[in-house]
Image (cartoon, rainbow, N blue to C red):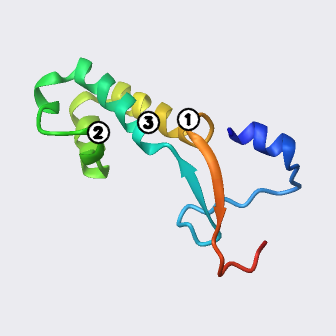
Amino acid sequence: MNLPTYLSLNPKKNLIFDFDATIAKLDVDWGKMLQEIYDRLVKIDPKTMTDFTPRSMSYPFWNTRIRKHGEEMKKILESYFVRAESEYLYGVQRIPSSSIF
């Protein structure tokens, strides 16, 4: 379920963003997203991608690609991360010790 659908079924007055999973954990299909990024980067820079898999890409990896390819690469990568919490989100898990719910 994507975020707009979830919010239409569960209306909220306020949203709290929890990037370190203190309150809740977002269930995101990271594997699908990383595979799509990997497939796109192989087309852009096939030679340097031979040492990586979708699961081995990390922040140092992203930073290296941005330094090498510039602003256009940054925009490509950002577009996937923006979509991560809409297209790739399939659920939210409450952290049991959190008292906010």
The kind of secondary structure element at disc 3 is helix
Q: Could you give the CA–CA distance between mark 1 and mark 3, rounded to whole angstroms?
A: 9 Å
Ranked by sequence position, the earlier of labels 1 and 3 is 3
Q: Are marks 1 and 3 in contact (CB under 8 Å)?
A: yes
Ranked by sequence position, the earlier of labels 2 and 3 is 3
Q: Measured along the vertical axis of the image, is residue 58 above or below residue 46?
A: below
Which numbered circle lies on residue 83?
Answer: 1
Query: Residue tagged by mark 2?
Result: 54
* Residue in view at x 74 percent, y 80 percent: 99
Q: Measured along the vertical axis of the image, is residue 40 above or below residue 24?
A: above
Q: Are marks 1 and 2 in contact (CB under 8 Å)?
A: no
Looking at the rendered image, the disc whose residue lies closer to the viewer, 1 or 2, is 2
Query: Residue tagged by mark 3?
Result: 33
Say which quarter of the image contains residue 82. top right
The kind of secondary structure element at disc 1 is helix
Disc 1 marks a residue whose amino acid type is Arg
Say which quarter of the image contains residue 25. bottom right
Which numbered circle lies on residue 14?
Answer: none
Q: Could you give the CA–CA distance between mark 2 and mark 3, rounded to whole angstroms?
A: 9 Å
Q: Could you give the CA–CA distance between mark 1 and mark 2, rounded to whole angstroms?
A: 17 Å
Q: Is residue 37 left or right of residue 15?
A: left
Ranked by sequence position, the earlier of labels 1 and 2 is 2
Q: Are marks 2 and 3 in contact (CB under 8 Å)?
A: no
* Residue in view at x 60 percent, y 43 percent: 89
* Residue in view at x 53 percent, y 66 percent: 20
Horizontal and vertical percent position of residue 69: 25, 28
Looking at the rendered image, the disc whose residue lies closer to the viewer, 1 or 3, is 3
